[in-house]
Amino acid sequence: MNGLMMDFPLTITSVMDYAKKVYPNVEIVSVTSDNPRHRYTYKDAFKRVNQLSNALAALGLQQGDRVATLAWNDYRHFELYYSVSCSGYVCHTINPRLFSEQIEFIVNHAEDQYLFTDPMFVPVIEGLIEKLPTLKGVIVLTSEEHMPSSDKLDLICYENFIAGHSEEFNYPQLEENNASSLCYTSGTTGNPKGVLYSHRSTVLHGLGSGAPNAFNISNREVVMPIVPMFHVNAWSLPYTCALSGSKIVFPGNKMADGPTLTSLINDEGVTFSAGVPTVWLALYNYLKAEGIAVPTLERCIVGGSACPLSLINAFRDDLDVNLQTAWGLTETSPLGSIFTLKPELDNASEEELDKLKVKQGLPIFGVDSKIVDFEGNELPWDGTSFGQLKVRGPWVAKAYYNMEKTDAHEEDGWFDTGDIVTYDKHGYMQITDRSKDLIKSGGEWISSIELENLAVDHPEIAEAAAIGYEHEKWGERPMIFAVRKEGSTVSAEELIASYQGKIAKWCIPDIVEFVDELPHTATGKLDKKVLRQKLSV
């Protein structure tokens, strides 16, 4: 027997319709290249979305065509999120930090028809345009008076592009499993891979990530997404905020600028934000150096890489801000787990809480998780058993766009994340490593992430990366590449000595090499592939 409920499709169009009907007067504030503080409402935004949809329709695009963006976080990019997907096209967000060869690959692999770009990225497209045969036009996200010039491109001004079009648009009746957006992985192990989201997966992820035991976003929040809109749909915040009726504050290309972020937080009353650890470290250092408080800011989500306990406690003690760790992947839309404290742990000691806070948190509903050993046997959640993390759920990718099946997608419907993790008896996950980054020494596994966290806990170390080097006796031994803080003279011997008593002796790194900076991927993660290549030279 089936239930007698309406078969109503979960589409991004329904999110837009809800927001403009229930929260028309909620603000969206942006920093853009042509306006230091643009301000309008959801009602204003969706009128312009309709104008954009009419303009896109006039181009003759067909359902499923890919429309690309190369842009920062602002209101025009927000308009593209909704217009492209709700019109039946696929919004393909491109990371401008990628190498030009990677951008060329993904534009051609996606067969993008049109590209919307911020003015500052026009030179990137100029250098690639002859290698992008599917691209029919480039629209610059600015006003007429701020349009860049180009000898190689016939550029179209965004404001002129939508001007004169009707503020009404009759959106197509889409199926909830129609493709809505496309995001490529950063390609650290080969060419980038495309993750093709559906309307259904996007809406469900927006609902799931906004829930109380996740981001906990309500209509009383003022949300500043520092995580880029070109990176996994800004962790779904442009959708979650619309679903929740939250005010949005977009920092544009000022996502690493302490004065701008501080001004936005204090002027606009930001209560919630999300970004990678380097963003929060830079903001903390700026606030401390200037002696500025951020009294409205309550919570920040930190993801993308491990967050040092020292930074979490500094935000709590000095800023009265709760820094919450989270985990996810492009393939999980991205949220898979987040740190929230269970009531059963309310009386835990400070030492116990410190151990919990650096973990990646509890799985959220919608992401079923398990860990298996290297023979595929499922392991218990006991805090000591570690294995490969596999996930499945309604917002987890079942395949990559336009690719043959990969080993990551199992026949039984599970996705191999590539992370090596443990779950404790309370259900908290801790990533011990990426499967490709584990160090095997004398038959025993060593976590590179644990070594990195301990290095960064040293007061004179800014950043560290641990890799294994070939060893005649032990197979591999760990070594550290470290960046000293400004003015530091800490020696390799002193850093190695700081590990004593914190981990098993056989896990302590043998070698420390100090460097001026560490290589990172386009999404800000440590690029250990480059470090390994350095060793092999």
Image (cartoon, rainbow, N blue to C red):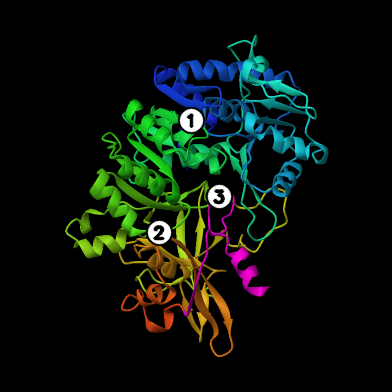
Q: Secondary structure at mark 3?
A: loop
- Residue 6's disc number: 1
3D distance between C-alphas at marks 3 and 1: 41 Å
Residue 72 placement (x, y as % from top left): 55, 34
Residue 287 shown left or right of residue 103 in the figure? left
Q: Is residue 219 visible?
A: yes
Residue at image point 50% right, 40% down: 234
Q: Which residue is mark 2?
A: 487
Residue 53 placement (x, y as % from top left): 63, 20
Residue 525 shown left or right of residue 385 in the figure? right
Q: Which residue is mark 3?
A: 523
Within 10 Å of the Cα at label 2, are there few (<14), some (14-19), or many (20+) other Cα atoms? few
- Residue 261's disc number: none
Label pair 3/1, CB-CB below 8 angstroms: no
Which badge, 2 or 3, is on the more N-terminal residue?
Answer: 2
In terms of image quadrants, where is residue 435?
bottom right
Between disc 1 and disc 2, the foreground one is: 2
Within 10 Å of the Cα at label 3, are there few (<14), some (14-19), or many (20+) other Cα atoms? some
In terms of image quadrants, where is residue 24?
top left
Which badge, 3 or 1, is on the more N-terminal residue?
Answer: 1
Q: Is residue 154 above or below residue 487?
A: above
Residue type, mark 2 in image: Gly
Residue 144 shown left or right of residue 463 in the figure? right
Is residue 31 located in the magenta-colored stretch of the structure?
no
Residue 100 placement (x, y as % from top left): 71, 46
3D distance between C-alphas at marks 2 and 3: 28 Å
Residue type, mark 1 in image: Met
Magenta range is: 510-537
3D distance between C-alphas at marks 1 and 2: 65 Å
Q: Secondary structure at mark 2?
A: loop
Q: Is residue 10 above or below residue 34?
A: below
